Image: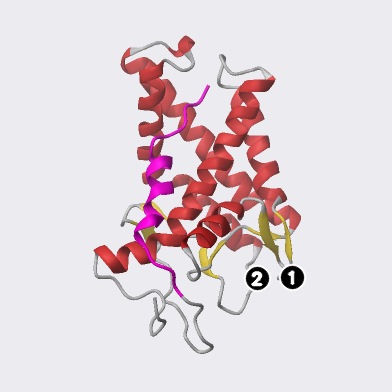
Amino acid sequence: MNSAPLFLVLIAAAPAAFAQTSQPTPGQTPPAPDKRVFGVFPNYRTANATAVYTPITVKQKLTIAAKDSFDYPLLGLSALIAAEGQWVNSNPSFGQGWAGYGRRVGVEYGDQAIGNMLTEGIYPSLLREDPRYFRRGYGSIRSRVWYAATRVFVTKTDSGATSFNIAEIAGNATGAVISDAYTPDQRNVGDTIETWWMQVAVDAASQVLKEFWPDVKHKFFHGPDPNPGVPR
């Protein structure tokens, strides 16, 4: 079984440091989102919710998915989750020592990469859904956390309409089933469901981080104001 990564707790707690922000007025366009959060984590699929909606092509969807799947920080994240799995001895047939750890890293990387390709590239292309996270950037802390976390269930279609996020849910479900093929201790229904919802939870936490990263950067790293001229 996969263990919940410890960084989910830190991500959930981070927004408490920020005050409520107001909605930008017309003509105030927030800066384009960074391509990396903390200069490390990939952030290729974040867009501004307040901007005029423009759909992206199938090629752009697949490019976003590939960048998120094969960028080097994903290996670091996989190594971190695998270390926790090594500690609690998840998938005991992998064994311990460096060999067991290497197997766990490979499994975690496979889960993340396959999930990204399915939820951000393949399924959105087939279903004509938009895989991007549309950062809100204003409102109370609670409303922004709720908005960010629930975007795993709500998305935009290529027409700009709002729809249930089939690509996220079905893509991670497919990824969980594929994971069973290379995880010998994880082939029952309960473990598959746990893998499925863990991937969804990681995506939800990642979107909370992306929602607040510009605020974190502005407050602690002297980055540009994400909402210039807007009272806080």
The one nearer the camera, 179 or 2, is 2
What's the magenta region?
A: 1-21
**Residue at x 39%, y 39% (from the top left corner):** 77
Q: Quadrant of residue 89?
A: top left
The one nearer the camera, 51 or 231, is 231
Q: Is residue 119 shown left or right of residue 88?
A: right
Q: Secondary structure at mark 1?
A: loop
Q: Is residue 153 above or below residue 26?
A: above
Residue type at mark 2: give it: Pro
Q: Is residue 157 above or below residue 52?
A: above
Instruction: Specify whether residue 43 is in view.
Output: no
Q: Which residue is mark 2?
A: 55
Residue type at mark 1: give it: Ser
Is disc 2 surrounded by few (<14), some (14 to 19) or many (20+) residues within 10 Å?
Answer: some
Q: Which residue is mark 1?
A: 159
Q: Is residue 168 above or below residue 64?
A: above
Q: Secondary structure at mark 2?
A: loop
Residue 75, percent from left and from top: 38, 38
Is disc 1 surrounded by few (<14), some (14 to 19) or many (20+) residues within 10 Å?
Answer: few
